Image (cartoon, grey):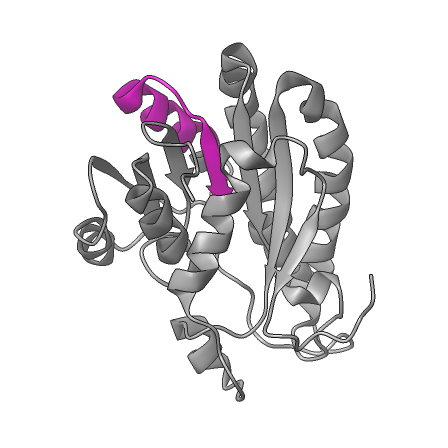
Amino acid sequence: MDLGIEGKVALVTAASAGLGLGCAQALGAEGCRVAINGHDPSRLEAAAATLRGDALTLDADVTDPDAPAALVASTVERFGAIDILVANAPGPPKARALEVTDDAIRAAVEANFLTSVRLVRAAVPHMRRAGWGRIVLLTSVAIKEPIPDLAASSAARTGSWAWAKSAAQDLIADGITLNVLAPGLHDTDRVRALGHTGPTGDPADFGRVAAFLCSVHTAFLSGVALQVDGAATLGLL
């Protein structure tokens, strides 16, 4: 299927490895001009070498409050537009609900809620001027079924989903969709570091799901949280 996004400009954050890189690779394979962000220059350059076509590397900590606006501005400066945003950020460490500290909760909200909000706010004016845009927030299956030993992540990411659900209604009339992807276990450095076991998905497959959500075929698909978890989550909603 032709996704109809050849030549579109995409910004993918936290994309030097894992699911972010899978999304960037899938968008590049569709002919997008891709800007990728990370905070390890060597890994970022190695990731860029795997992308098809014109790629821009942006070395920054996406959770820095000033970074989202700067990343969007750099993408627009290089490519003249931003049509697609895939917002991703590093996840918090393990902790159960009664163990997690105030500081850990604040850090999780900063990284896994406010970072996405800031990226969207920075990108939307450019998309509105173009009359077209696709936004995908990467969260976790924790927004459907909280993960007991990732309490801070579950709380912050669920907040981002609630915010996205409302924001999607404000964008659809402008030709902009906003959806959430909720990954389960995938073969990534984070999943391995957390020690989770069981079947894992391929980040490349996950990236292709994200690319479809960014396609011309999803103009009326917005405000959706799609879990990509190999049937692991048992919740019905």
Q: Please give left or right for residue 111 compared with residue 32 in the image.
A: right
In the rendered image, which quarter is residue 128 located in? top right
Quarter of the image with the C terminus is bottom right
Query: Residue reaching furthest right?
Result: 236
Magenta region includes residue 77 = yes
Say above or below: 55 vs 195: above
Residue 111 in percent (x, y) is at 56, 51
Q: Residue at 18% of width from left, 56% of height from top?
A: 46
Q: Residue at 53% of width from left, 85% of height from top?
A: 196
Say above or below: 115 vs 151: above
Residue 88, visible in the rendered structure:
no
Residue 227, visible in the rendered structure:
yes
User: What is the magenta range?
Assistant: 69-88
In the rendered image, which quarter is residue 33 located in? top left
Q: Please give left or right for residue 143 compared with residue 39 in the image.
A: right
Quarter of the image with the N terminus is top left
In the rendered image, which quarter is residue 76 located in? top left
Residue 88 in percent (x, y) is at 49, 50
